């Protein structure tokens, strides 16, 4: 890492002088404007604090790839990545740290959003009960799978956003109201969990990232807030 000075935001400009004769009809401009993550090595394990600069944005083709399953036993690098992803979510939900680090609060993060095309996602859904500090769901999911789902569908009344999308895309994102998932945790232990409502929606948003799907792919373009009957609207 190059010392990390100055932070991100250095965008390269491409300027080409072309005569009319050779001016291209289509200019494909995909410029990687991200700075590299500043990795540090502790006891032989490479780690790094994730910030918004590490999150790639729509237009980056990695977000459209089907991510690769992670092999077992988990590598130290994949375990550390999961920890770093969860640390990002914790920091992003801590008002003081989020302000210091300029983080957008998030409840989920998928490895492809870090330009890493692996089936890893961290989820941190805070408790909806102010009396209970235990998160509703908190884990790093390796190779998560939806084993079954309800016929009942649900969507967030406010629509969805994404840390990889710097604009508002209004509309309902209809998903399964309840899902049963399996995944491997950081210890390599297979887990089977049933989730409903908000937590189920978050996990479906994350699994979509592992399949190259963005939330707005689900929005009805002509009628973003039209719903067929019987769909649960959350909040
Ligand atoms: C992060 C997304 C994931 C959620 C979007 C809808 C369901 C999953 C995320 C953009 C800005 C807001 C933020 C959010 C939040 C909510 C409740 C409590 C605390 C992962 N992402 N957000 N989207 N924050 N924070 O793109 O968390 O909902 O893939
Ligand atoms: Ni997202």
Image (cartoon, rainbow, N blue to C red):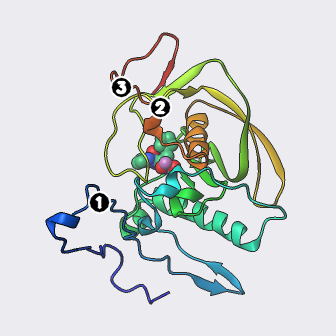
Q: Give the residue pinned by disc 1.
A: 27
Q: Quadrant of residue 157?
A: top left
Q: Residues within 10 Å of mark 3 (few under 14, many from 20)?
A: some
Q: Can residue 41 be spotted in the picture?
A: yes
- Would you say the beta carbon of the disc 1 residue lies within 8 angstroms of ligand 2? no
| Total labels drawn | 3
What whole-number distance in Å separates the C-alpha atoms at marks 1 and 2?
Answer: 29 Å
For residue 77, side relative to residue 90 (left or right): right
What whole-number distance in Å separates the C-alpha atoms at marks 2 and 3?
Answer: 9 Å
- Which callout, 1 or 2, points to the residue nearer the camera? 1
Residue shown at the point (72%, 67%) measured from the top left: 79
Indicate which disc, 1 or 3, sits on the residue closer to the N terminus. Answer: 1
Q: Which mark is residue 224?
A: 3
Q: Give the residue pinned by disc 2.
A: 218
Q: Can residue 107 be spotted in the picture?
A: no
Q: Quadrant of residue 168?
A: top left
- Which callout, 1 or 3, points to the residue nearer the camera? 1
**Answer yes or no: do the residues labelled 1 and 3 have beta carbons within 8 Å?**
no
What whole-number distance in Å separates the C-alpha atoms at marks 1 and 3?
Answer: 31 Å
Q: Which mark is residue 161?
A: none
Residue 72, image x, y percentages: 83, 61
Residue 57, image x, y percentages: 41, 57
Q: Secondary structure at mark 1?
A: loop
Q: Quadrant of residue 56?
A: bottom left
Residue 121, image x, y percentages: 63, 53
Indicate which disc, 2 or 3, sits on the residue closer to the N terminus. Answer: 2
Residue 209, image x, y percentages: 56, 47
For residue 131, side relative to residue 142 (left or right): left
For residue 188, side relative to residue 231 (left or right): right
Residue in front for this viewpoint, 67 or 180: 67
**Answer yes or no: do the residues labelled 1 and 2 have beta carbons within 8 Å?**
no
């Amino acid at each position: 890492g190059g010392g990390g000075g100055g932070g991100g935001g250095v965008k390269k400009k491409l300027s080409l002088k072309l005569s009319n004769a050779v001016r291209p009809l289509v200019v494909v401009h995909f410029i990687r404007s991200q700075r590299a993550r500043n990795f540090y090595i502790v006891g032989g394990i490479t780690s790094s604090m994730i910030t918004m600069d590490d999150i790639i944005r729509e237009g980056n083709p990695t977000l459209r790839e089907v991510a690769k399953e992670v092999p077992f036993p988990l590598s130290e690098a994949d375990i550390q990545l999961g920890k770093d992803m969860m640390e990002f979510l914790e920091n992003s939900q801590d008002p003081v740290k989020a302000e210091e680090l300029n983080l957008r609060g998030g409840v989920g993060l998928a490895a492809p959003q870090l330009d890493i095309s692996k089936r890893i996602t961290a989820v941190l859904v805070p408790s909806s009960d102010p009396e209970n500090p235990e998160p509703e769901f908190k884990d790093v999911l390796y190779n998560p799978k939806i084993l079954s789902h309800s016929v009942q569908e649900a969507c967030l009344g406010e629509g969805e956003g994404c840390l990889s999308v710097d604009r508002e895309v209004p509309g309902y994102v209809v998903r399964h109201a309840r899902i049963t998932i399996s995944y491997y945790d950081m210890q390599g232990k297979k887990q089977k969990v049933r989730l409903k409502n908000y937590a189920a929606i978050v996990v479906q948003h994350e699994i979509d990232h592992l399949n190259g799907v963005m939330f707005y792919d689900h929005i009805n373009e002509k009628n973003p807030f039209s719903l067929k009957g019987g769909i649960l609207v959350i909040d």
